[in-house]
Amino acid sequence: MAPSFPDALPIGAQHPRGRALLAVRKDSVPGRILVEGSWEHSRLLSTPTVIDTFYYCAEVCDQPQTAAEIAARAHEVYRISPKMLARVSRRSRSDGLISIARLPEWRAEDVRLSESSLVLVADGVEYAGNLGTLIRTVDAARADCLVLTSRRARPNHPAVYAASRGMVLTTPVLEFTSITEAASWLKKRAFEVHLADPAATDSYKTPQYQGRTAFVVGSEGEGLHQAWHEQGFEKVSIPMLGQADSLNVALSAGILLFEARARKEGW
């Protein structure tokens, strides 16, 4: 049974809200992210996230209950045609549920730290999928936040939502304007900082990871910016036992974060 919202105005690409949807689809609207799909919306609905606009395609949607729950939360509801849906959907087979949601705004002073806090810093992340996976990994390891420096991928890219499994809505993500500023934030809060460097002689298994711990991982193509190496932090590496010289940044982050988490909790 298709959902029906009598007051929902049918719109196309030329309508202001249609243009707004296309803009968010291109991740060109800061602070707004496109959410598509029934599972993705179930995750969205489980958080207090503000839903600006809900778009549904009655000809395709077969989730009336989910659609009704989204419509009840959204500030505005519009109906789009299958043609419009095909233009904005990022899927080969859409279920006709698309929303524009507001990303939470995180400030450094809002992140509450404990004596054994765990933080991941990602420098120069290039790909939205990797950024989303890093956010998901931070959540999985129960780290306190993800810190971004020199980032290239946008947190509001729809692929970030998908790769993070919606954790971008609940995981604190802080962004600093410079590496020096981020390093200063870590130093002032007494973090023991470890730079993930494939050339490092010390294994990631060497440190004890007591107290506040932070790992810094670099971009997929260029590694860590030289400015991080100038901060005087220790370096650790994950031994490469085969022919590859490094691991995917998200996989490396997972190994490091879970090693620290295991040490902190005595697994």
Image (tube, grey):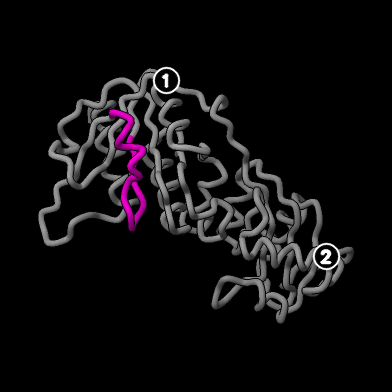
Q: Position of residue 128 (x, y in %)?
A: 48, 58
Disc with the residue nearer the chain's start (1 vs 2): 2
Q: Secondary structure at mark 2?
A: helix
Task: Return the x and y of residue 70 as percentages of the image width and height.
Answer: 71, 55
Count of numbered circles on the image: 2
- Above or below, 24 relative to 195: below
Q: Quadrant of residue 47?
A: top right
Quadrant including the C terminus: top left
Q: Is residue 93 above or below residue 109?
A: below
* Residue type, mark 2 in image: Pro
Q: Which of the 4 quarters of the picture holds residue 254?
A: top left
Q: Is residue 106 magenta?
A: no
Check disc 1 and give the amino acid type: Arg
Q: Residue at x 61, y 56 (%)?
A: 41
Residue at mark 1 to residue at mark 2: CA–CA distance: 46 Å
Q: Residues within 10 Å of mark 2 (few under 14, many from 20)?
A: few
Residue 189 numbered tag: 1
Marks 1 & 2, CB-CB < 8 Å contact = no
Q: Residue at x 39, y 45 (%)?
A: 137
Q: Which residues are magenta?
A: 215-232
Left or right of 135 on screen, residue 28: right
Residue of label 2: 16
Q: Is residue 245 left or right of residue 39?
A: left
Residue 224 picture location, percent across and down: 33, 45
- Majority secondary structure of the magenta segment? loop
List the single residue furthest toward the bottom. 83
